[in-house]
Image (cartoon, rainbow, N blue to C red):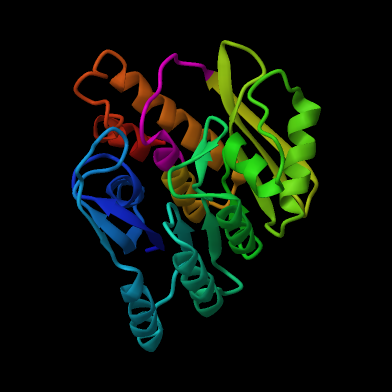
């Protein structure tokens, strides 16, 4: 059985980060391990008064124990990292557990819609860029791509050549494959474009653009892509599966936003993911 470890926070309520990653990876027939970077009573999107316990100091001890028992990992997948220290610790984790056969996958969670998430800044983006140098695959959205490149965010009006040029420059940071999410050339479709710097190949895949804002779709996409790549290392197929599953989750949530504003109803879609 393949094995993925996901390194990110866990919310006791709210569908994001590890709460999303663990069931999705497990449903794909992959052993899901985790290193929680923090424990929150709820996720932070729309809630106030939530509790937060930082687990940064536990991560090196977990890594040391795993190393002592020669734990093999087919992929390391990182999501939200909340501090400079956590990025540096994860960078050391990469050095310890990287092999010729496994994948290091970084979702450089920093912002959306042209803005940093609360608590992040340009200095944090530079530190995240250093982590991306060690990754085999990075999964930025358009905002995070601009932050990694130190450029102004372009929300719309771009063309395919603009995105291809951005993908090439992102790959020059160091990762072999760049997967750029949230790409849209018109009002009715949205999707993903990727670039493999070793082969020079681009790939794009789009689906219907569903109006509205749905929490946790980035985590759903990244977790599904990580699992698909570990099951079968075919990037185009993995992207199709990840996009189709994410869109399926959104469609199951449309009409239920009032009671599920804290995340998409991915649980109802897990059977279809297993069939994919």
Left or right: 148 as drawn, with respect to 121: right
Quadrant location, the N terminus: bottom left
Residue 24 in the image: state x and y as whole percent.
33, 45
Left or right: 2 as drawn, with respect to 264: right
Indicate whether residue 223 is drawn in magenta. no
Residue 115 in the image: state x and y as whole percent.
54, 36
- The residue depicted at 30 percent of the width and 21 percent of the height is 252
**Residue closest to the eye, 161 or 235:** 161
Indicate whether residue 218 is drawn in magenta. yes
Which portion, as a residue range, is magenta? 208-221
**Residue closest to the eye, 115 or 161:** 115
Residue 270 in the image: state x and y as whole percent.
29, 36
Left or right: 211 as drawn, with respect to 61: right
**Residue closest to the eye, 255 or 153:** 153
The answer to whether residue 255 is above or below residue 1 is above
- The residue depicted at 42 percent of the width and 47 percent of the height is 223
Q: How many labels does the image show?
A: 0
- The residue depicted at 31 percent of the width and 30 percent of the height is 264
Residue 25 in the image: state x and y as whole percent.
35, 50
Quadrant location, the C terminus: top left
- The residue depicted at 56 percent of the width and 77 percent of the height is 95
């Amino acid at each position: 059985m393949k094995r993925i470890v996901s390194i990110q926070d866990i919310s006791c309520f709210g569908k994001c980060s590890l709460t999303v990653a663990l069931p999705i990876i497990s449903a794909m027939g992959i052993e899901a391990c985790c290193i929680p970077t923090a424990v929150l009573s709820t996720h932070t999107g729309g809630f106030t008064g939530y509790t937060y316990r930082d687990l940064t100091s536990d991560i090196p001890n977990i890594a040391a124990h795993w190393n002592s028992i020669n734990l093999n990992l087919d992929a390391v997948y990182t999501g939200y990292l909340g501090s400079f220290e956590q990025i540096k610790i994860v960078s050391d984790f990469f050095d310890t557990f990287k092999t010729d056969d496994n994948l290091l996958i970084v979702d450089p969670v920093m912002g959306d819609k042209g803005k940093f998430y609360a608590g992040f800044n340009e200095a944090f983006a530079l530190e995240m860029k250093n982590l991306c140098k060690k990754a085999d695959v990075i999964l930025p959205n358009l905002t995070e791509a601009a932050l990694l490149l130190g450029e102004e965010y372009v929300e719309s009006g771009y063309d395919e050549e603009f995105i291809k040029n951005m993908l090439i420059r992102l790959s020059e940071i160091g990762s072999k494959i760049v997967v750029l999410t949230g790409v849209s050339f018109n009002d009715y479709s949205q999707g993903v474009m990727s670039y493999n710097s070793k082969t020079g190949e681009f790939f794009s895949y789009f689906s219907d653009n569903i109006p509205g804002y749905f929490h946790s779709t980035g985590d759903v996409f990244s977790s599904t892509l990580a699992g698909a790549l570990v099951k079968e290392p075919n990037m185009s197929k993995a992207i199709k599966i990840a996009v189709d599953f994410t869109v399926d989750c959104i469609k199951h949530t449309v009409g239920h936003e009032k009671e599920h504003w804290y995340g998409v109803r991915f649980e109802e879609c897990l059977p279809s993911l297993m069939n994919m």
